[in-house]
């Protein structure tokens, strides 16, 4: 590929900015100063900009602790999206959230420019388990556990796969519960609609895992980490 594309893909700068760096004579490939933006490079070449090595990595995977109030989308006319929480140098072309969390849901959200992985994880037959913690208005009990385990049908006829509900706190006095729920699908507002169908309301919702990937306890809301390919293979 062309050196200007290589550097732009690695977010060294826009194509225009990269052309300026090349003109300045501070870009080298395998020790030779690059003279033209058209020069071809391979991913295995040693590319330096101002003495700093720029390794080629095609795909990036970020694990974010999504805060409330931001959309799981790449762009929106009026509202902030999760992409805006990435540092400018991490806003690679094509980077997208893998699936969606509601605006008021927090927790584990993957972002990647690897379209293939994104597609694979969202495919209905892939069955990636997702675990959520929630605060509920209403007292969840064994009946609720059974209803969710049986694979319920929502009011609009949507048939759901069995879901595993664990009750962590049952508070009769305040008519509330804290629960953990494992689902395999990711239907629109799925957990809120499941609780709605049994006369309860989700007050707080946080995703804590996706496949074998867990939300790190020390990752603050709004922060993110880059995952290695090895981490990513755990989700598949
Ligand atoms: N279920 C919901 O209702 N909302 C989410 O954000 C995720 C799962």
Image (tube, rainbow, N blue to C red):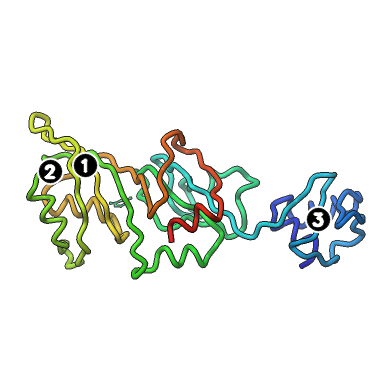
Mark 3 residue's CB less than 8 Å from ligand 1:
no
Q: Residue at x 49, y 64 (%)?
A: 117
Outermost residue toward the bottom in this view: 125
Are the residues tagged 2 and 1 within 8 Å (C-beta)? yes
Mark 1 surroundings: few (<14), some (14-19) or many (≥20) residues within 10 A: some
Mark 3 surroundings: few (<14), some (14-19) or many (≥20) residues within 10 A: some
Q: Secondary structure at mark 3?
A: loop
Tell me the number on the disc at residue 46.
Answer: 3
Residue at numbered disc 1:
179
Q: Secondary structure at mark 2?
A: loop
Spatial CA span between label 1 and label 3: 52 Å
Q: Earlier in the sequence, mark 1 or mark 3?
A: 3
Tell me the number on the disc at residue 52.
Answer: none
The spot of residue 159 in percent (x, y) is 19, 67
Residue at numbered disc 2:
140
Classify the position of the C terminus by image quarter.
bottom left
């Amino acid at each position: 590929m062309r050196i200007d594309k290589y550097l732009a893909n690695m977010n060294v700068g826009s194509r225009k900015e990269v052309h300026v760096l090349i003109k300045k004579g501070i870009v080298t490939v395998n020790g030779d100063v690059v003279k033209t933006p058209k020069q071809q490079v391979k991913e295995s070449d040693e590319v330096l900009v101002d003495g700093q090595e720029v390794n080629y990595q095609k795909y990036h995977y970020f694990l974010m602790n999504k805060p409330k109030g931001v959309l799981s989308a790449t762009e929106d006319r009026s509202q902030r999206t999760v992409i805006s929480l990435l540092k400018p140098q991490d806003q690679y072309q094509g980077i997208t959230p893998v699936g969606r969390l509601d605006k008021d849901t927090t927790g584990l959200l993957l972002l990647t420019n690897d379209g293939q992985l994104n597609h694979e994880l969202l495919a209905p037959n892939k069955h990636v388990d997702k675990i959520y913690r929630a605060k509920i208005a209403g007292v969840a009990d064994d009946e609720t556990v059974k209803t969710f385990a049986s694979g319920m049908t929502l009011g609009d006829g949507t048939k759901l796969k069995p879901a595993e509900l664990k009750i962590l706190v049952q508070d009769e006095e305040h008519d509330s519960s804290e629960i953990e729920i494992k689902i395999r699908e990711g239907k629109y507002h799925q957990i809120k609609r499941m609780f709605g169908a049994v006369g309860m309301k989700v007050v707080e919702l946080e995703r804590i895992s996706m496949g074998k990937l867990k939300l790190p306890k020390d990752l603050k809301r709004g922060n993110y980490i880059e995952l290695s390919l090895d981490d990513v293979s755990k989700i598949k």
